[in-house]
Image (spheres, rainbow, N blue to C red):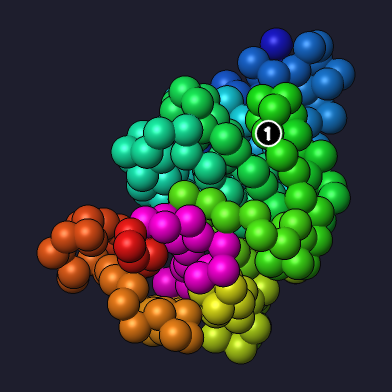
Amino acid sequence: MDAGGQGTTATRSRASGGVFAEEEAEVARAAARDADELEAMTRRREAGEFLEQVVEEVEVMGERLVVAPGVFVPRQRTALLIGEAVREARARRAPRVLEMCAGAAPVAALVARGVPGARVHVADVDDAALAVARQNLPAEAVLHLGDGWAALPPGERFDVIAAVPPYVPRDRLALMPREAREHEPPAALLGGEDGLDHVRTLLAGAADRLARGGVVAPGSRTAGSAAPRPRSPAPPAGSARWTRCSARTTAPPCSRVRDPAGDLIRIQQPTD
Ligand SMILES: C[S@@+](CC[C@H](N)C(=O)[O-])C[C@H]1O[C@@H](n2cnc3c(N)ncnc32)[C@H](O)[C@@H]1O
């Protein structure tokens, strides 16, 4: 099956800037029920939509997740954070795990699928994102709608908190690929002047939300190769005894977390 009569799906994908045109065409062909649907998908891709939004699916670490137009598409590099969250969750009995700024909830979904007994929560300010997250999570997962920490009921604490908050510095949005600029909500991307506004908010409130010995790992990235790496944000106020970890900190309780795109910060609440 191929898109009707206007060149092959792969040729059209390449003409509209697709780098992995053959692979993309294969994904679209597998997802389309008939030639008409494949043609509609090819047109949407030509118009700049993410392939993942067009086929409403993304594969992360071998697991299929639902995605949808208008909701942030989980990136492959989030596998690093997912791996850390799964490792931390497995180290605890019946861990309570929260994905903040969850979007489609790639971290929470893979923890739920990979860590038996994990009690998974997600939070996001966007109800469209939570509707997608719902489809990726088990029925017992708890979803919280609201702005930052205000989404959560008072007193709720977690053993593992992970997040990929919006991370693009305001003046770097123009460097983002067209797909992101035109087909992801700006609120899912923009993190203030240096891209770290949401990371700071997350860390400022984390002390009140972590159980003893709990960890928080906020992933953050800058947009575009020309963008400078952000300085790691400071640990939460009043948390002098917390351990702040980065790719250069290897002594326990830090683990070495390497990522060419930047450090993965991991902060641990004291156990006593
Ligand atoms: C970069 S996306 C990451 C989504 C998901 N964690 C992932 O990796 O695919 C950031 C998400 O943060 C959400 N968000 C933006 N501002 C927020 C806020 N003030 N409180 C909670 N969530 C917010 C957006 O709706 C979006 O889903």
Q: Can residue 46 be seen in this view?
A: no
Horizontal and vertical percent for residue 70?
80, 50
107, 207: nearer the viewer:
207
Is 209 included in the stretch rendered in magenta? Answer: yes
Left of 66 or right of it: where is 125? right
Kindly state the secondary structure of the residue where label 1 is placed. loop
Picture quadrant of residue 27: top right
Q: Which residues are drawn in magenta?
A: 206-225
Considering only vertical position in the picture, is 91 above or below 5? below
The residue closer to the viewer here, 85 or 15, is 85
Instruction: Name the residue: 47% across, 86% down.
Output: 237
Q: State which quarter of the image contains the C terminus.
A: bottom left
Callout 1 crowding tier (Cα within 10 Å): few <14, some 14–19, many ≥20: some
Q: Quadrant of residue 171?
A: bottom right
Closer-to-camera residue (121/223): 121
| 165 and 158: which is toward the camera | 158
Q: Name the residue under label 1.
A: 141
Q: Residue furthest front?
A: 272
Q: Can residue 201 be seen in this view?
A: yes
Residue shown at 40% from the left, 80% from the top: 239
Picture residue at 66% right of the left edge, 60% below the top: 155
